[in-house]
Image: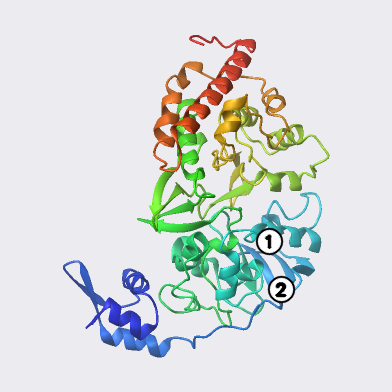
Amino acid sequence: MLTTKEAAALLGVSPRRVNNLIEVGALKAQKFGRAWMVDEASVRERVQAKPQRGRPRADAGVETARYTLMCHDHEVLAFTYHGRTGSVAAVEPLDGIAWKPFGVGRRDREPNRYDMAEWLRDRAIPGLRPHLPSALRDLAVRTPAVLMFQSWGLSLSDPYWFRPEGVEVSWAAVNYYDNGYDEDFGDLMLTGLSPRNAGEPAFADGRPASGAKGAPAITRSPDTATNGMLSKTWVRRRGTDYLIKGGTGNENREPYNEKLATRLLERLLDPNEFVPYAVTERHGRAYSSCANMAGPDTELIPAQDVLTAFGITEGRDLHTGYLRALEELGVEDGRRLIDKMIVADYLMANFDRHTHNFGLLRSVESLDGYRVAPLFDHGCGFYSRATTAELEARPYVWESHPFREYPSQQLALVEDLAWYDPSALDGFLDDIAEVMGENPEIDKRFIAAVQKQTERQIQTVNDLAAERGVVVAGW
């Protein structure tokens, strides 16, 4: 019998990786008290069966390669991807074209190589993500798109993936929901700490996926197909996938803003209308944490993909166009739920409600059941980029998104405030003091200034509600 540390040394992995292998049954072990003792024969067996390690050539397997875009096991379209240029060629619709992603071109035409290339760019880690250069260097990969392809393009937000030409593999064999994923790459992307098991076999048990003949080495992380500018990673705890997301600068305001936004939304919205966030700690720093809203049979469709599918461009009225798209898709209560988003963003002074952080959910196989996704991603609210002096000097003005540039103009788009209960916000200024007070880098002057600004926002919404016929008392 071996200790987990001894087993890790023989396998060339971390002790945590050994624990993961034990949990999934890939290594035989017995527990003595709180410690595992690993069967030496199973370790030796794994060492012998393990593929040769070593850094692959940069862009290995995706320099120029042919893939099938898959949705579950539906063959959607075939395409050629050029890893060096990020371009796409030879796009060929297949029998499963009905399952193509919303963001790959307009609904009323067949996708072309430009549509596909743009969708792939949006799917990969953005180039300005913190710690990305060190991740690319450690893994000997040139671009984040290559990382994405090496992980089959798999995500925890939708069911799409890229099957290399000539590879026999199914959704059941590769998806993260059933097979799990490695978290070491996520540690690197979240904190800058080097992954301890880069280059290991793709699956938790060390084998290629069932029937995956000729499959390339992959990073095996949903982080490779998770966009957004802040550092983040996915983790699985007790069967639930959580997105862990960082903040910026020494003050690290964003995680606490997510928690504070949850306090606000708990007061205003129904529980199924928003994603709750908590603050967690990793490696001595605070991060926000939220459970995944999607699943193996539920797809998150960003608003940008809806706009793309309906041919609604930046030069048009996005608000009117988006609401018409929701109506055509049969989304129930779409107007009211968008109104709620606008009001909530106004109250928290959220300047970053872009078209990739709100949208729809739908049922994957039946391609229906469209509904507005719960509100998420509020870290840029509550004056996350403002200074104390700016907040104390005068009413603070931010640039709003996504429908109008000025907050007052966007708020004016809200027609029906019958759902709004002004009394629900009684005591919310105390919530601001409590949650922001948990951040050791924030001083009391800043908190008081945020309270004063938020009080003005509440008053403005109450005034609008009174104009719309809502009874407002106490203000």
Dot 1 lies on which element? Answer: loop
Please indicate whether residue 45 sits to the left or right of residue 235 in the image: left
Return the x and y of residue 461 as percentages of the image width and height.
59, 19
In the rendered view, would you say 283 is above or below 386? below
Any part of residue 84 in sight = yes
The residue lying furthest to the left in this view is 33
* Badge 2: residue crowd in 10 Å (few <14, some 14–19, many ≥20): many
The residue lying furthest to the bottom in this view is 48
Dot 2 lies on which element? Answer: loop
Kind of residue at disc 2: Gly
Could you say which disc has been placed on residue 316 in the image? none
* Residue at numbered disc 1: 96
Residues 108 and 183: in front is: 183
Residue plotted at (29% across, 82% down): 6
Return the x and y of residue 49 as percentages of the image width and height.
42, 88
Could you say which disc has been placed on residue 83 in the image? 2
Kind of residue at disc 1: Gly
Residues 75 and 451: in front is: 451
Residue plotted at (39% across, 52% down): 281
Please indicate whether residue 425 sits to the left or right of residue 168 in the image: left
Please indicate whether residue 2 sits to the left or right of residue 100 in the image: left
Do the residues bearing badges 2 and 1 touch, measured as CB atoms within 8 Å? Answer: no
Return the x and y of residue 303 as percentages of the image width and height.
67, 43
Query: Marks 2 and 1, how far apart in space?
Result: 25 Å
Residues 139 and 98: in front is: 139
Return the x and y of residue 135 as percentages of the image width and height.
56, 69
